[in-house]
Amino acid sequence: MDAIIDPDQKYYRLAVSLYALRRKRDAIADRRGLFGEPGWDILLDLFIADRRRTEIQVSSVCLDAGVPSTTILRWIARLEAEGLIYRIADNADARRRYVRLTDEGRRMMASVLDGMGSLGSSTGGSSSTAAFFG
């Protein structure tokens, strides 16, 4: 009997691992924001929140990444223009706005994470990391 794999769970676990590795790298280097990919950090953060069914306020996006808020706001605008995320007002508090992935953003993240998750299998089943350090 073949195992049933929930691709959403697989992508979620990979996204969480990637985000954690990025924060660990920042901590080890002791230079928050040095390895900047704000767009990727935002998309990972929102993908994880989407899978957890939690909301992220615009002011809280990627706080752990140590990127200035002006940079984050520019990237939110860019990702919004690309159709990958959108902002929505809080019905209870007009001062608060949330940011979420669009359907297109979810599809793109699933596609990217699927491609990244299959990197280890592209070398005949051996991990590309093991092959590199082998």
Image (cartoon, helix red, strand yellow):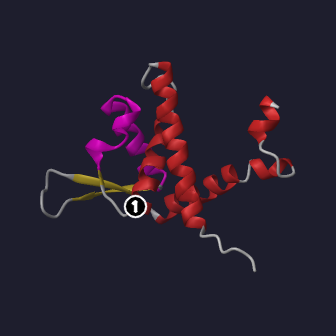
The quadrant of the rendering that contains the N terminus is bottom right
Near-viewer residue (11 or 93): 11
| Residue segment shown in magenta | 57-83
Near-viewer residue (18 or 126): 126
Q: Quadrant of residue 66?
A: top left
The quadrant of the rendering that contains the C terminus is top right
Residue 82 visible in the snapshot: yes
The amino acid at mark 1 is Arg
Say left or right for 86 vs 128.
left
User: Which x, y percent locates residue 38?
Assistant: 46, 36
Residue under label 1:
52
**Magenta stretch: residue 126 in it?**
no
Say left or right for 19 vs 68.
right
User: Which x, y percent locates residue 127?
Assistant: 77, 44
User: Which x, y percent locates residue 99?
Assistant: 33, 53
Residue 101 visible in the snapshot: no
**Magenta stretch: residue 81 in it?**
yes
Q: Could you classify mark 1 by the number of other residues whose Cα lies within 10 Å: few (under 14), some (14-19), or many (20 or more)?
A: few
Near-viewer residue (132 or 112): 132
8 up-or-down from 36: above or below: below
Residue with the most extreme right position: 124
Q: Quadrant of residue 5?
A: bottom right
34 up-or-down from 23: above or below: above
Residue with the most extreme bottom position: 1
Q: Residue at x 12, y 57 (%)?
A: 93
